[in-house]
Structures are given as structure tokens and as C-alpha cells.
Image: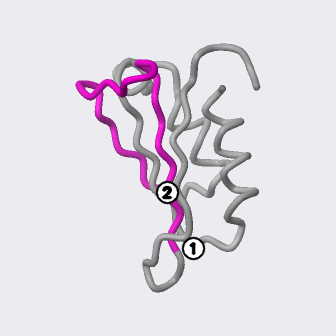
Amino acid sequence: MAPAHAAELFLKRVPMADCFEVILYGSLAATGKGHFTDLAISPVLGAERTKIIWFPKTVLPFHPNGMEFSAFGSGEEKLGEWRVYSIGGRA
């Protein structure tokens, strides 16, 4: 699933969120800046309220291109989270 598409789907789940954190894992993190992964995700969720974290040396069990989205409310309570993988193509 493409990172921007994943961000769109996550935003639909938690439209009331005040801020987001997105962790990019494995090869997605290692090549993410070169492939503008952060620039694909941030505009969807709102660049001013999205923090991108890069973990290129951490590979999740299912696939090396893992992403973990978290949404937070105004009191910093976690409203939702979702782990998804960018394995090519669009779901």
C-alpha cells in the first residue's frame, strides 16, 4: 500500500485527531527520504501536525517496508494506531 494512500485511510479512521506520529521501518525508512515518503504522508495528515520517525535498522516481521501510524487528541491521548506495509501497488 502506498504511504500516501495509507495516510488517507488512517485519516478517515481518526479525523478528529490533533496530531499524528508515523514511524517508518526497514527499507522504507532507509530509502524514504530519497523516495519522498515523508513528503507523501505529511500533506495528507497535515505537515504541521505530523511527526515522521525513521527506523531503517528495524525490520518488522511481515515485510521490510513497514509503517506505523498513531493519532493523538488534544490531551495527547492516543486515539488510534495502525501498522501497515508498503509492498507495492495500491490496495
Q: Looking at the image, is 64 positioned above or below residue 24? A: above
Q: Position of residue 46 (x, y in %)?
A: 62, 57
Does residue 77 show up magenta in the picture?
no
| Label 2: which secondary element | strand
Magenta-highlighted residues: 50-72
Q: In this picture, is 27 found above or below 80?
A: above
Q: Residue at x 37, y 24 (%)?
A: 61
- Say which mark, if any, is on residue 86: none
At label 1, the amino acid type is Asp
- The percent position of residue 41, horizontal first and vertical second, equals 59, 41
Quadrant, the N terminus = top right
Residue 49 visible somewhere in the drawing: no
Which quadrant does the C terminus fall into?
A: top right
- Image x and y of residue 20, in percent: 51, 60
For disc 1, the neighbor class at 10 Å (few under 14, some 14 to 19, many from 20) is some
Q: Which mark is residue 70?
A: 2
- Can residue 59 be seen here? The reply is yes
